[in-house]
């Protein structure tokens, strides 16, 4: 049957057509297409890789920033805590110092007061005794001749007053 | 496609009536189918069964002279007017083309009744006595087999001219004619070149930008075949064989698809012609065996089997060598049978209308609807088959080549794939 017996002319032309087509496409067609497709695929791959890396870096940077913020916050809290501690400590110390100072001052004041009091007392005593002597002298001068026994008596009386 | 299916139908009964001397009433299904599947010296035009686009006939006569003439010289159209109803009918008849070269006369014709029916033959006129003898032989053969009509019997070595009613001595010349199939082949080659080159031009012009739409589809196909088939199977050797395999794929695909278009640029049943698939298979065979490495030839000539299978009697060698040829032969027959089958089914479905026409109007109406629907379905299926067959051919060719060039460590993998 005609269909199953290859026709010589058609075989010849098919061969010629295919070889020509192959030569033309193998020279100018397929290599260009395959190279272009390959290079584009490479570019895309590289782009994806680059994007992935960039994202990774960004994520890293973000994490790092987060870490820094966290750290800063911690440090801040610590500092605040320290400051508070220091404040209370300083206050405490100041209080202590102040109280010590105050007690010292009080002490000194007490001492000086005591001293002044004593001095005043002494002076007052002298003066009182002098006044009283004077008074007594003036009063008694006329009455008493014996100055000396009078003064002893007055002193004795003054001592009694003082004891009271 | 609907139009196309109908077109075949319109052309069919008229042609049958025109040619079939004996079967004027019925539809000669076989002849119509084989006419559509076969080659021709002219290209049919729509809505006419007699007019053809003439194509050049290139032949080498018996004494070595070359001739090139238009195929329209071999036929002529007669228009007959029916006296009763004034209906005009056109017939295609044979003509004998006479050419003169170096003072000698050469006659060519396109016989219907001959061993070379449908092919251009060189003919020589016979004497009256020889004519009478041949007529007698034809009548005798007709009587021996009542199914055969007179003058439909081919007598070996002679061509019968129905127009003049004479026998001629015939010789089938070397025929390089640009037939319908050859022209379709060249058109397909041009289409493939245009497709590929347009993509190349796009890359040259636009560089890295990815193509869209049609070009994108083309690129997708290239990528599908190159990445999915060639690179996967051949690995690092892919660039060496990619041009051949890609050319195979696109040439087959375009030929398949062109065959599905019924009017001019298409309609030739190219990949359903064994000559075309044979050349493709032979090329695959050549590429495979030229590139076969030491391992490949060792597997064939001294395979790894028990010694008694190969030493005194080369049983395995015979099997392996037989296998070398059966692989491409399977490629050839697979593509041929698939594509021819598809065409045949569509034509047969359309012809059903004219077969059922004999049973009345209702049967005709019903069969028209069913046939057209089935034809459309089959044509759509054939589009799919066109892709699949081109793909399968390329894939198997790739596997055969990969088996021939594989290094030993890859050998098992590729053989596994082939299985």
Image (cartoon, coloured by chain):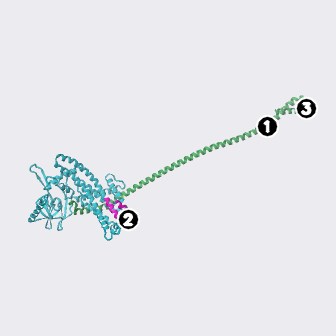
Question: Label 2: few (<14), some or many (≥20) within 10 Å?
Answer: few
**Figure quadrant of the C terminus of chain B:** bottom left
Compared across the picture, whether B349 is left or right of A99 comes to left
Which label number is shown at residue A118? 1
Is residue A94 inside the magenta stretch? no
**Gap in Å between the C-alphas at discs 1 and 3?**
32 Å
| Residue plotted at (25% across, 51% down) | B378
Q: Mark 1 packing: few (<14 Cα in 10 Å), some, or many (20+)?
A: few
Judge if badges 1 and 3 mark residues of a common chain: yes
Q: Is residue B221 above or below residue A117?
A: below
Q: CA gap, disc 2 to disc 3?
A: 158 Å
Seen from this angle, which residue lies furthest front?
B308
Q: Report x, y in % for residue A39.
A: 38, 57
Compare residues A110 and B175 and report the one nearer the observer: B175
Comparing B51 with B306, the one in front is: B306
Which chain is indicated by disc 1? A
Kindly state the secondary structure of the residue where label 3 is placed: loop
Query: Residue shown at 27%/53% (left/top)?
Result: B383
Distance between mark 1 and mark 2 Cα atoms:
126 Å
Residue B238 in sight from this viewpoint: no
Where does label 3 land, which residue? A146
Earlier along the polypeptide chain: callout 1 or callout 3? 1
Residue B312 found in image quarter: bottom left
Looking at the rendered image, the disc whose residue lies closer to the viewer, 1 or 3, is: 1
Residue assigned mark 2: B408
Q: Colour of chain B?
A: cyan
Percent x, y of residue A137 = 87, 31
Q: Give the x, y percent position of residue B101.
A: 15, 66
At horizontal 24% and vertical 60% (from top left) the residue drawn is B274
**Percent x, y of residue B138:** 12, 62
Magenta residues (range): B394-417
What is chain A's hue in the picture?
green
């Amino acid at each position: 049957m005609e269909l199953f017996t290859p026709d010589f002319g058609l075989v010849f032309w098919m061969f010629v057509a295919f070889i020509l087509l192959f030569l033309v496409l193998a020279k100018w067609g397929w290599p260009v297409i395959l190279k272009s497709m390959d290079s584009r695929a490479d570019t895309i791959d590289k782009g994806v890789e680059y994007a992935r890396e960039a994202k990774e870096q960004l994520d890293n940077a973000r994490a790092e920033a987060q870490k820094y913020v966290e750290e800063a916050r911690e440090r801040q809290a610590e500092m605040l805590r320290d400051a508070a501690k220091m404040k209370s400590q300083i206050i405490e110390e100041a209080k202590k110092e102040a109280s010590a100072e105050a007690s010292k001052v009080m002490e000194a004041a007490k001492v000086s007061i005591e001293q002044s009091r004593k001095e005043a007392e002494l002076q007052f005593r002298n003066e009182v005794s002098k006044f009283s002597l004077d008074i007594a002298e003036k009063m008694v001068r006329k009455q008493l001749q014996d100055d000396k026994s009078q003064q002893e008596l007055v002193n004795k009386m003054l001592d009694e007053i003082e004891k009271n | 496609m609907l139009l196309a299916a109908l077109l075949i139908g319109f052309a069919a009964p008229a042609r049958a009536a025109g040619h079939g001397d004996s079967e004027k009433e019925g539809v000669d299904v076989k002849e119509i189918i084989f006419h559509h599947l076969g080659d021709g010296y002219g290209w049919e035009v729509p809505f006419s069964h007699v007019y053809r686009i003439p194509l050049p006939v290139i032949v080498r006569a018996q004494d070595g002279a070359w001739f090139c003439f238009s195929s329209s010289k071999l036929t002529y159209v007669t228009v007959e007017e029916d006296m009763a109803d004034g209906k005009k009918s056109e017939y295609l008849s044979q003509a004998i083309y006479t050419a003169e070269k170096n003072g000698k006369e050469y006659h060519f014709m396109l016989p219907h009744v001959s061993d070379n029916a449908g092919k251009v033959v060189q003919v020589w006129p016979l004497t009256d006595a020889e004519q009478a003898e041949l007529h007698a032989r034809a009548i005798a053969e007709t009587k021996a087999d009542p199914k055969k009509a007179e003058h439909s019997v081919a007598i070996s070595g002679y061509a019968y001219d129905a127009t003049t009613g004479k026998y001629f001595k015939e010789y089938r010349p070397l025929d390089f004619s640009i037939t319908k199939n050859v022209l379709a082949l060249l058109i397909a080659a041009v289409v493939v070149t245009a497709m590929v080159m347009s993509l190349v031009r796009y890359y040259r012009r636009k560089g890295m930008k990815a193509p869209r739409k049609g070009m994108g589809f083309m690129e997708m196909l290239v990528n599908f075949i190159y990445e999915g088939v060639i690179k996967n199977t051949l690995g690092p050797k892919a660039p060496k064989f990619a041009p051949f395999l890609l050319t195979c794929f696109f040439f087959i695909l375009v030929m398949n698809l062109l065959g599905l278009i019924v009017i001019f640029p298409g309609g030739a049943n190219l990949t359903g012609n064994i000559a075309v698939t044979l050349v493709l298979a032979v090329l695959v065979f050549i590429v495979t065996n030229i590139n076969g490495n030491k391992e490949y030839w060792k597997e064939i000539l001294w395979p790894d089997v028990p010694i008694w299978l190969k030493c005194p009697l080369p049983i395995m060698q015979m099997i392996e060598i037989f296998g070398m040829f059966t692989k491409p032969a399977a490629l050839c027959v697979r593509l041929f049978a698939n594509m021819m089958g598809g065409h045949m089914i569509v034509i047969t479905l359309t012809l059903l209308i004219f077969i059922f026409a004999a049973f009345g109007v209702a049967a005709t109406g019903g069969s028209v609807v069913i046939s057209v629907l089935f034809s459309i379905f089959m044509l759509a299926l054939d589009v799919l088959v066109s892709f699949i067959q081109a793909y399968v051919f390329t894939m198997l060719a790739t596997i055969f080549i990969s088996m021939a060039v594989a290094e030993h460590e890859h050998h098992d993998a590729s053989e596994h794939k082939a299985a």
